[in-house]
């Protein structure tokens, strides 16, 4: 009888210990694991949308999953709430970011998981937009006689070349500037006859890129507001070998031989000093441009 009493007390003590352990058990915070462990994505030109995927686990059982847009300086805007799950402790979260073609700023999304023990975990996913244009600023000289800056421009790298360096980099040259009494401020291609007259060395270049041009009615303010290639890609009838009579505020279009379309805004045209006659002359001055070109 005494042995039975001791056994019973032992069982009770064991149950008490087990109950105490269960009560004091520590539940870990939920976990969020993004697909391939990548918490960011850089959009590419072909993307129209992107879906990020994250696996969520909660040993304390899931209570809710919320997604907030925190792109605006960290201010939270709830965009999704999930209360039905794949199981009590696991769920695969999918969220699609649409209209990437017109996306111009970074999107940041915070996913927050709360379990039934009120434990909370948050992680942030970042999507960087594809910027479909390059924007460059440049100053070109209107004469080959001053060889310190250059009159030859590459839209692929935004660099200006002198008459000497352009000859050895002819495959890169898309725009050439000169000023004449008849045509005024002019930008043309290496295969244009007036360009060849202004810069005789272009005649023997190994490559003479057939850039083509056209004037536009696009205003300077409209040009400034362009952040992607939608407007640029819609340009058509670009067939001239040069654009002439350029003035401050003009915006003209071009298409390189490689098929890249772009726009150029004239920000200023200035006189320069003819070192031979010591007279101010546009022919020895400069033109300042801003270029927006497809990547």
Image: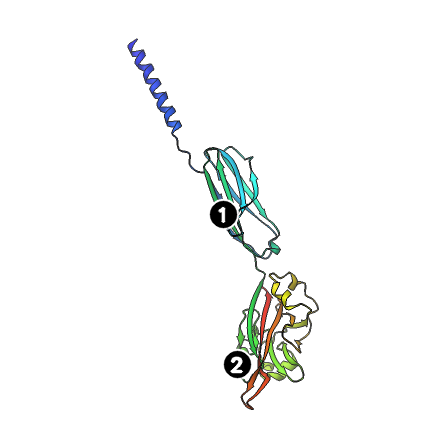
Q: Residue furthest left?
A: 2
Q: Residue furthest top?
A: 1
Residue 30 in sight here: no
Side of 165 where 180 appears, left or right? right
Place residue 196 in its image quadrant. bottom right
Callout 2 environment at 10 Å: few (<14), some (14 to 19), or many (20+)? few
The image shows residue 167 at horizontal and vertical percentages of 54, 79
Report the quarter where the N terminus lies: top left
Observer-nearest of 167 and 274: 274
Is the residue 225 above or below the residue 285 in the image?
above
Is the residue 5 above or below the residue 125 in the image?
above
Observer-nearest of 278 and 111: 278
Observer-nearest of 23 and 45: 23
Would you say the residues marked 1 and 2 are in contact, meaning their CB atoms lie under 8 Å apart?
no
Residue 115 in sight here: yes
The image shows residue 97 at horizontal and vertical percentages of 58, 49
Q: Residue furthest bottom?
A: 277
Report the quarter where the C terminus lies: bottom right
Label 2 element class:
helix
Q: Residue at x 37, y 25 (%)?
A: 20
Q: Residue at x 66, y 72 (%)?
A: 213
Q: Which residue is mark 1?
A: 124
Chain-order first, disc 1 or disc 2? 1
Mark 1 vs mark 2, foreground winner is 1
Q: Residue at x 49, y 47 (%)?
A: 124
Q: Which residue is mark 2?
A: 164
């Amino acid at each position: 009888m005494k042995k039975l009493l001791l056994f019973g007390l032992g069982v009770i003590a064991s149950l008490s210990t087990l109950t105490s352990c269960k009560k004091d058990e520590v539940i870990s915070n939920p976990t969020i694991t993004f697909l391939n462990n990548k918490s960011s994505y850089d959009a590419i030109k072909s993307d129209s949308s992107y879906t990020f995927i994250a696996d969520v686990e909660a040993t304390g059982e899931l209570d809710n999953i919320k997604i907030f847009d925190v792109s605006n300086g960290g201010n939270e805007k709830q965009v999704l709430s999930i209360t039905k799950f794949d199981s009590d402790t696991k769920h695969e979260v999918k969220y699609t970011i649409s209209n990437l073609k017109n996306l111009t700023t970074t999107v940041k999304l915070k996913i927050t998981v709360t379990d039934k023990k009120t434990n909370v975990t948050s992680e942030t996913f970042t999507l960087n937009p594809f910027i479909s244009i390059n924007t460059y600023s440049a100053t070109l000289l209107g004469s080959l006689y001053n060889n310190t800056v250059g009159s030859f421009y590459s839209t692929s790298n935004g660099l200006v070349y002198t008459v000497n360096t352009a000859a050895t980099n002819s495959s890169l040259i898309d725009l050439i500037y000169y000023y004449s009494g008849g045509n005024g401020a002019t930008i043309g291609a290496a295969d244009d006859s007036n360009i060849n007259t202004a810069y005789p060395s272009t005649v023997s270049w190994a490559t003479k890129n057939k850039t083509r041009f056209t004037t536009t009615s696009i205003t300077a303010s409209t040009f400034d507001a362009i952040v992607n290639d939608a407007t640029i890609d819609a340009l058509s009838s670009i067939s001239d070998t040069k654009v002439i009579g350029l003035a401050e505020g003009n915006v003209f279009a071009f298409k390189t031989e490689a098929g890249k379309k772009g726009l150029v805004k004239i920000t200023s045209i200035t006189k320069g000093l003819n070192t031979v006659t010591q007279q101010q002359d546009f022919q020895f001055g400069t033109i300042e441009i801003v270029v927006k070109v497809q990547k």
